[in-house]
Amino acid sequence: MKMSELKKIGFIGTGIMGAAMAGHLMDAGFEVSVYNRTKSKAQKLIERGARWCETAGECAKGQDVVITIVGYPKDVEQVYLSAGGIVDSAKNGAYLVDMTTSSPIVAEKIYNAAKLKNLHAVDAPVTGGDIGAKNATLTILVGGDEQDFDALKPVFEVLGKNIVYEGGAGAGQKTKACNQIAIAGTLAGVCEAFAYAKMSGLDIEKVYAAISSGAASSFQMSGVVRKGLDDDFKPGFMLKHLAKDLAIGVETATAYGKTLPILSMVLHELRKMEEEGKGAEGTQALLKYYGIKN
Ligand code: NAP
């Protein structure tokens, strides 16, 4: 890896994705400080030498780069824009990188607030799932100023393989919305295919063997459905986060005066699952919802 002049990183959000990503940055030689709402989720990183901070603002202070991967757009707004938060606390000229899947509107707001303080903010959501975070093979979708993207490249290269500059502030989040819209339809379609296999009395494994490598193949089938069929229900990507992502797609399409009917239908089903208390389950729990698994 090319080591740049960026050496000190404040990392906020050490959940399923963030813990693995912060670990890679430590392995690559960056000096990493961490903050997370629940401290225990940063414990392994602290034991490996990461410096613990009590607040997001403290974690941003004096860093060359501040990276966040928290939960929802409201969490992003809170850590960046609240009094004593990241924008208030980061040093002059620092780079702020939000890797949460969040709203493009929030990304633009942060970019503008950061500009006023001579800070360089980019939105850089990721795809590739928990496996991509563990294996440092994420796809990273970046919006903001292109020279900031170039400066941050050595950091992104530690975390991912396919790193794409998408355009101005918010363009990374808009691209991530495209990704999630595609996933929504594919995932629902794949689940309906296996629900149909079950209701029509077919052998599910034989159906999987027949259709998983042909024209209907997809990661949603070979990754998500396969996990569920193998009774691996440990959450990798939580349903509540998929619902949040689809809501961002619906809300922004509405703001453009458009509707995306399939996206809205899948969001409706996910909201029902959340109401049933299943939000923290992984996307493979859809197999139970569709009656494919008990
Ligand atoms: P997660 O396990 O819930 O991690 C998020 C972490 O951020 C949690 O540990 C949470 O603290 C912390 N956090 C939330 N709000 C905070 C705040 N205001 N201050 C400090 N810490 C805060 O979720 P994840 O799966 O890693 O996903 C993180 C983001 O990446 C989400 O936006 C998700 O949609 C996106 N994403 C996930 C995947 C995936 O496959 N998992 C793939 C691509 C993108 P607590 O521990 O207290 O909840």
Image (spheres, helix red, strand yellow):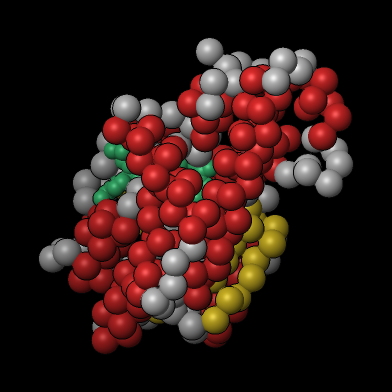
Comparing 202 with 104, the one in front is 202
> Left or right: 15 with respect to 197?
left
Above or below 108: residue 41: above
Query: Can the viewer see residue 200 in this picture?
Result: yes
Would you place residue 147 above or below residue 217 in this image?
A: below
Residue furthest out toward the top: 294
Q: Can residue 6 be seen in the rendering of this structure?
A: no
Task: Using residue 219 as the reference point, say whether residue 100 is left or right of it.
Answer: left
Q: In this view, does 212 lie to the left or right of 47?
A: right
Residue, x 58% and y 50% (percent of image)? 185
View quadrant of ligand 1: top left
- Please tell me which residue lies in front, 109 or 193: 193
Asked whether 222 or 96 is in front, the reply is 222
Q: Which residue is drawn at 26% across and 42% down?
A: 37
Which percent across, then down, holds residue 232?
A: 59, 20
The x, y position of residue 233, in whole percent, is: 53, 22
Location of residue 74 with respect to 22 vertically, above or below: below
Q: Which corner quadrant of the image does residue 40 belong to? A: top left
At 62% from the left and 27% from the top, the residue drawn is: 195
